[in-house]
Amino acid sequence: MSRTIHEFRSPARFVAGTVGVPGDRTFFLQVSQDQRVMSVELEKQQVLILADRLGYLLDEVARRFGASVPPETEQVVDTEPLANPIESEFRVGSMGLGWDAEASAVVVELLAITEQPLDESVILDDTEEGPDTVRVFLSADAARQFSARSMRVIAAGRPLCPLCTMPLDASGHICARSNGYKRDVEFSRSDEFIDPDVLAALGRVVPGFDASFQVDHDSTTADDDTDDDRPE
């Protein structure tokens, strides 16, 4: 099928963000350059993989080619929410990473999900046949910042139960270590049931748009693997 490649060679911004409350979030990547703003929808696990592989790629580039690469960081410069309106161009099925030595830039490629198996030769290629694609060129600094923010977004999910370590829902929680009794929200927030650190973490989570950045920078709560932050 004929494809469209949306290329951003000098993006002002490339970030991960969410819409929704912890436990019911939809994940997006958003890139902007000049007057162009484009968003694509993807799974939480895809954001995690991309952030992790970006860090690995930068480390390999520094080791193999002696390129100047900033160290890994947890400090996030851009904590603003996604720009409105958020209109997904497509849902991401496959991703590709590369290094443009001439431009000293990381190349991130996001390909639309397809019904048929993907011919991997189209990744990071300008062939006319294949799924629609968003291709973003990032400096090493921008790539590190993308990874740092992405990890912050992922870590801003539902806090964990101190007894069974499963995610706590706003509607209640069935705790396997308390005989499966479903405690309501008011009781589950009681300091007789939850230790002070977990209670403090619960208080920091503010439901709302792009809730990932409505938590304190020192929050250590994270989504459990069973927390399916997926769009309906």
Image (cartoon, rainbow, N blue to C red):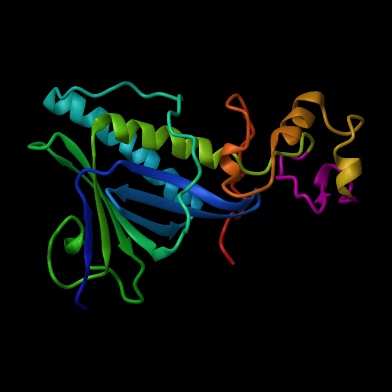
Measuring from the top left, give residue 212's x and y in whole percent.
57, 41
Against 110, residue 161 (above or below) is above
Measuring from the top left, give residue 86's x and y in whole percent.
47, 58
- Name which residue lies at 53% across and 42% down: 154
Of 146 and 226, the residue lying toward us: 146
Residue 193: name its quadrant: top right
Measuring from the top left, give residue 18's x and y in whole percent.
53, 50
Of 108 and 49, the residue lying toward us: 108
Of 138 and 177, the residue lying toward us: 138
Residue 102: name its quadrant: top left
- Location of the C terminus by quadrant is bottom right
Residue 40: name its quadrant: bottom left
Q: Is residue 200 magenta?
A: no
- Name which residue lies at 39% across and 40% down: 51
Of 34 and 172, the residue lying toward us: 34
Indicate left or right for 85 with 71 as reference: right
Measuring from the top left, give residue 30's x and y in whole percent.
39, 51
Of all residues, the one furthest to the front in this rendering is 35
- Location of the N terminus by quadrant is bottom left
- What main secondary structure does the magenta stretch of the protein show? loop
Which residues fall within the magenta stretch? 164-183
